[in-house]
Amino acid sequence: MKLSIPSPATELPKSSVMIVFGTRPEIVKLAPLIRRLGDAAYVVHTGQHYDRGMSAVFLQSCGIERVHRQLHVGGLPRAAQIGRGAEQIAEAITQVEPTYVVVQGDTNATFAAALAANAAGVRLGHVEAGLRANDRRMPEEHNRVMVDHISDDLFAATEANRSNLLAEGIADERILVTGNPVVEAVHRQRAAAAFDVDELVRLGVYPDRYVLATLHRQENVDSPANLLATLHAFNDIASSGWPVIFPVHPRTRAMLADLDAEHLLDALIAEEPLPYERFLALAAHAAVLVSDSGGIQEEATVLGRPVLVVRDSTERPEALGSFTKLVTPQALAAEAAALLDDVENTLLGLASLPSPFGDGQATERIAEHIHSAVIHAAVVRRAAEES
């Protein structure tokens, strides 16, 4: 029996693609795909980031109009987040019966959804596959490796990511190099830079004359020595005449309170977590960014800004030596001082460099692949029913 393949323009069935996220970076990078798929997307939020500033505001600013299913695993230990998340996502898969499940990155939400899809026999696509820091101390490293090995389609951002996957024995036909959706996410938000002046005026800072900092990872926040060393470095930077804007992650704020060290925020411009467009407005004009975030390492390459990465390792080596540099908490103040001393020339040099994370067409490539997979599955299923 010959299969009749529909046109590429054929619309996908409603809710045929389940997209699962749980954190701010996942929202940012999956939002373009959700908008692109329209009614075909069934959106599940695990609630891994459950503070309003870390989630609801981001959904609105990224253009996600509806979450179809909201879970509540936030605040639980890692094993519980993964276990309960997988159980509840499996229940959603049973009820909705999607043809395809999409996850992104390396979070507990990603691993939970990948386990649920794999157990249900639903085709699984992993956006941002193949990232490796080669640092097994990182929970994220375990998540991303295991998700890659049980995914059917691996959407690698760069050729280096593809090489990582091939080195681990993953078949080449499962890998598609797409670029990273963060490039188009940043471009979309920056297309109308209406927040820039308002943000700078509100905070009393000038373009290219301040530092923007974030801190949230376990290795920094859960280590009193690293957290205090980093906050002291922020204070040193501020005392040298460079204002430090610091949107404080809830986890970071809670640890500072536990350490009775909230006074270390007094000399900084301490903010609540910001909506995405307002964060990018500040990032676009910062002289230097300081962060332990993976996403900010990528976003800075689109914005042409340098980043001091407060980590021992990174899964994004493509930006090292140009946009990013690894630093320890203890060396941060000295590294920042050296960079700020010649920041005008640094910014001038970065302005001419393209982002190593793609050309802004990643979402379209991913969507086209998913479209073909879903349509093909529908044709095979119909043929089986008619035979």
Image (tube, rainbow, N blue to C red):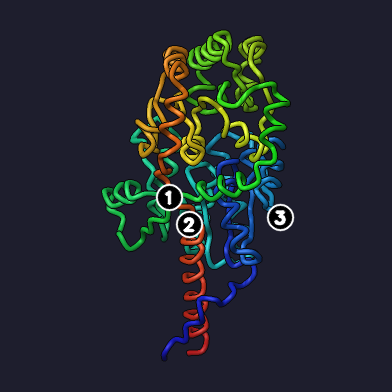
Q: Where's residue 35, x and y in %?
A: 62, 59
Residue 162 appears in view: yes
Residue nearest the observer in this picture, 349 or 332 = 349
Image quadrant assignment for residue 271? top right
State the residue position of label 2.
361
Q: Where's residue 218, x and y in %?
A: 51, 27
Above or below for 175 versus 252: below
Between circles 3 and 2, the one closer to the viewer is: 2
State the residue position of label 1.
358
Q: Where's residue 350, x and y in %?
A: 43, 34
State the residue position of label 3.
66
Between circles 3 and 1, the one closer to the viewer is: 1
Q: Amino acid at mark 3?
A: Arg
Mark 2 neighbour density, 10 Å: few (under 14) some (14–19) many (20 or more): some
**CA–CA distance between discs 1 and 2?**
7 Å
Mark 1 neighbour density, 10 Å: few (under 14) some (14–19) many (20 or more): some
Q: Amino acid at mark 1?
A: Gly
**CA–CA distance between discs 3 and 2?**
24 Å
The residue lying at 69 percent from left, 30 percent from top is: 199
- The residue tagged with tag 2: helix, strand or loop? loop
Q: Is 113 left, or right, of 136 in this rendering?
A: right
Above or below for 38 versus 67: below
The residue lying at 47 percent from left, 24 percent from top is: 344
Circles 1 and 2, Cβ within 8 Å, touching? The answer is: yes
Q: Where's residue 43, x and y in %?
A: 64, 56
Residue nearest the observer in this picture, 55 or 35 = 35
Circles 3 and 2, Cβ within 8 Å, touching? The answer is: no
The residue lying at 69 percent from left, 41 percent from top is: 194
What quarter of the picture does the N terminus occupy?
bottom left
